[in-house]
Image: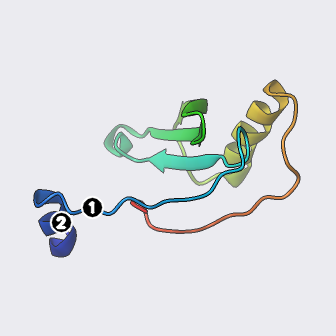
Amino acid sequence: MEPDAVKKRRHRRFVRKRFICAGVNDIWAQDQHDKWKRFGLWLHNGIDPFMNYNNWMKVWWTNRNPRLIASYYIQAARQLGGTKIAFPFFFHGDNI
């Protein structure tokens, strides 16, 4: 447990982060949740935060296969007719 985070949550002192987005499909946020880990399932989600559009939401039995996660991105890009070539990745904690 993180006692500082618990105190902030109880007092509703979370600070929202801001980012700049040029428009639709400029940023795609990927996330995975292990809430169903005890059942052997992981939820993978890809969101366009500009439109609050869910590009994909998949449930699978593993999260250790980067090819699988990349295939979710590629499938969504093909369905939307392409995407950018550059892939900026930012590795942060779960709650940014």
Instruction: Look at the picture and state if 89 lies above or below 39.
Output: below
* Residue 79 in the figure: left or right of residue 66: right
Residue 8's mark? 2
Where residue 95 sits: x, y (%)?
Answer: 39, 60
Which amino acid, mark 1? Phe
Residue 96's mark? none
Q: Nearer the viewer, residue 7 or 58?
A: 7
Residue depicted at 73% across the width and 40% down the height: 25
Where residue 73 sits: x, y (%)?
Answer: 73, 41
Residue depicted at 54% across the width and 34% down the height: 52
Instruction: Look at the picture and state if 46 lies above or below 90.
Output: above
Q: Residue furthest top?
A: 79
- The residue wearing badge 1 is 14
Colour pattern? rainbow
Quarter holding residue 86: bottom right
Where residue 16 sits: x, y (%)?
Answer: 38, 59
Q: Are marks 1 and 2 in contact (CB under 8 Å)?
A: yes
Which amino acid, mark 2? Lys
* Residue 89 in the figure: left or right of residue 59: right
Q: Earlier in the sequence, mark 1 or mark 2?
A: 2
Instruction: Look at the picture and state if 26 lies above or below 8.
Output: above
* Residue 67 in the figure: left or right of residue 95: right
Position of the C terminus, as image quadrant, is bottom left
Residue depicted at 73% across the width and 47% down the height: 26
How packed mark 2 is, by other alpha carbons closer than 10 Å (few <14, some 14-19, many 20 or more), is few
Determine the secondary structure under disc 1: loop
Determine the secondary structure under disc 2: helix
* Residue 18 in the figure: left or right of residue 7: right
Position of the N terminus, as image quadrant, is bottom left
